[in-house]
Image: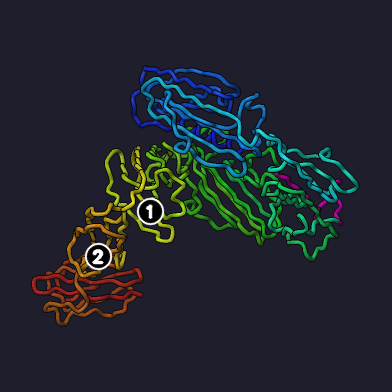
Amino acid sequence: MKKTRFLLMLLTVLCLVGVNGRAQSNVFHTMTFINEGGGYFSFSRSTPDGQSVDTMDYTFRRSSTETLLVQEGSSVYIGLSSERRGSSFYGGIRYEGGFPRLLHFYVDNREVPLDSIYSFYDEEGFYYWYSYTLANVTSDHTFRAVFGEWEEDMTPRPTHTVAFIESHNLSCGYEDSDGSWISGTAIGQNRGDTLFVTVEEGMHFSVGFGGVRPEGSSPNRDPERRPLHLYVDDVEIPLDSLSRRFDCATLEYGYSYRQVVTSDHEVRVVFGPVDTTQLPPLHTIEVVNEGGGYIDYGELSSYIDDNMWHFLPDTIPFQAEEGMAVNIVMHSLRPESGRYEDYSNPRLLHFYIDGVEIPLDSIFEGYYIDRYFYKYPLPNITSSHTVRAVFGQWDTLPSIHTMTIVNQGGGKIHSPRSKAHDAIRMLLVSEGDPFTVRMDSYRPGSPHYGDYANPKLLHFYVDDVEVPLGSIFSGYDAATQTLHYVYTDSNVTANHVFRAEFGPWSDDAYVLTLEANDPTMGSVFGGGTYEAGTEATLTATPNEGYRFVSWQDGNTDNPRTVTVTADATYIATFEAEVGIGEVDGADGITLHPNPASGRVSLRGVEPGAEVTVVDMQGRTHSKISTRDSEITLEVNLPGTYFVRIVGERQCAVRKLLVR
């Protein structure tokens, strides 16, 4: 289940988070957990150094009160769920007579608004997920979750009939009132070749069907019958829009009615003889696991062995129909992984597709908990392929650092593997990797404005040091009235805490948008939102080799202070420090050849002058102190450059084109 995987990942996060070098405490505090109503209430904890995790009564299955001791400095994570009709857990044994809907949540008798701890809604699983994290426990705490019934459960629902025509060729299923899926040959009433199933209003139904290609055989399938058309209420559903899997020579289709049932329905599949000229060709995908590392092939399990989760050191071929998509996922397991010892070679060293090596950094998906993920997609199979993953031993391991993201006020924060509504989210990043936090401010006219109780970013802190919003403002989307703020640590070397403080918008706040005439020449800072009548400081910072000229309205102040009275855009103009042709006593200075192919002669230079070659981004490529009036320059990368000559009597710039 998706939720189970989600909780397991969160438990492992708590296993690893913690501040490096923090001293262990011998002080313990009592955590009291009250499940009032018997809904879904999970709990986990980490030790202060983050190296172990303990979970007590992972799912409370009844109305109960549980207490346990937690070491000071530990972190506590609480997960809460509201299961709607349609959820596979709704009304199941998990609750033992309890209620599936979360009504209230209290911490030390203080009610925590549910919208402040809301994480996400799973449209497939039909549940709302809430999460609460308490980092660095320093005292006793009581957590109480109150569950109840959904209002819609109080009255019986009407029922409707779904007719599955030619049901002996179909795998039919429907959702019952407690959210469980029921399927098989004993459901409904058979009358001839049609199966009639009664489904409650608001529920769903599904159908599966397939056919055997001429290359294969099946004792339960007629090789002369292949699905040709699917009709739901006489509306044809394209077969290529359905989920499908190809197992050996059997092609399986799956269809689920996405809308809730509100009336009677009829499902009809038309079968016919196999026309081999119409069949997509088959291609062989050969997966080579060299070294015996961890390859998680996900959807490939249906093609090979549903009970396998990884390849052994072996070559495993499978067939796929043309046009299908497959993802090959490789793992590099770190020693702290509980599965590290399962593999003699747990680290991915190389990856090849059809004999061509693919750089690992081009397929790197990220670091999570105790492993590195690499994913290579085959989005549209049109030919046979050989995929080879080479595994080996670790030599050195990069350090891991904890990035703690605090969402104060419940605004919108984007970050890798993070949910926007989490009050506190802790992520692990390898040393040397970049880490980016992006925050959005939604103005009252934005279509996203009502999604958040506090949609305006007020302050941003890194390790309790406030970062001016004007320095991280990255742009304003006028269409959605959204302001974007981006902070990036390009080289993570330590633990960090990022805290974003959100609040409501006032009626008279305006947006200042700053731009540069050429972003390669310089940067601008000071944009963002300001209350009416306040002052904003706008700064234009030129890159090396360029200078600030003016703002678009002719103002040359830098920094510049403006009084905010309305939305406005300010554009900074930059140019090269010395323009082409701005020569002071530099007659006779020439570049030859120009354009050049790497080597170029600079003639007529004052001995002792300093010659600098810079590119269009202001980066210095070479710097020479001349001794003679003619020197040779070497520029090997194609592009446009500026050659600056500065001496006692000379000051000149020459433009150089390298092909």
Which numbered tag is attached to residue 484? 1
The one nearer the camera, 481 or 134, is 481
Q: Residue furthest left?
A: 648
Which numbered tag is attached to residue 622? 2
Give the vertical position of 156 relative to 569 (above or below). above
Q: Residue furthest bottom?
A: 588
At mark 1, the secondary structure is strand
Q: Is residue 398 visible?
A: yes
Give the vertical position of 457 relative to 634 (above or below). above
Give the vertical position of 110 relative to 86 (above or below). above
Task: Give how far across and how far down residue 165 sits, in percent.
Answer: 84, 51
Instruction: From the viewer's perspective, tell me whether residue 30 is left or right of residue 187.
Output: left
Task: Give how far across and how far down residue 579 sits, in percent.
Answer: 21, 74
The one nearer the camera, 70 or 317, is 70
Please tell me whether the stretch drawn in magenta is mainly helix, strand or loop. loop
Q: Give the range drawn in magenta.
A: 204-224
Task: Give how far across and how far down residue 30 sits, in percent.
Answer: 43, 18
The one nearer the camera, 504 or 626, is 504
Q: Can residue 214 be seen in this view?
A: no
Residue appearing at x 83%, y 57% in the figure: 271
Say few, some or many: other residues with alpha carbon within 10 Å of mark 1 (under 14 / 14 to 19 / 20 or more): some
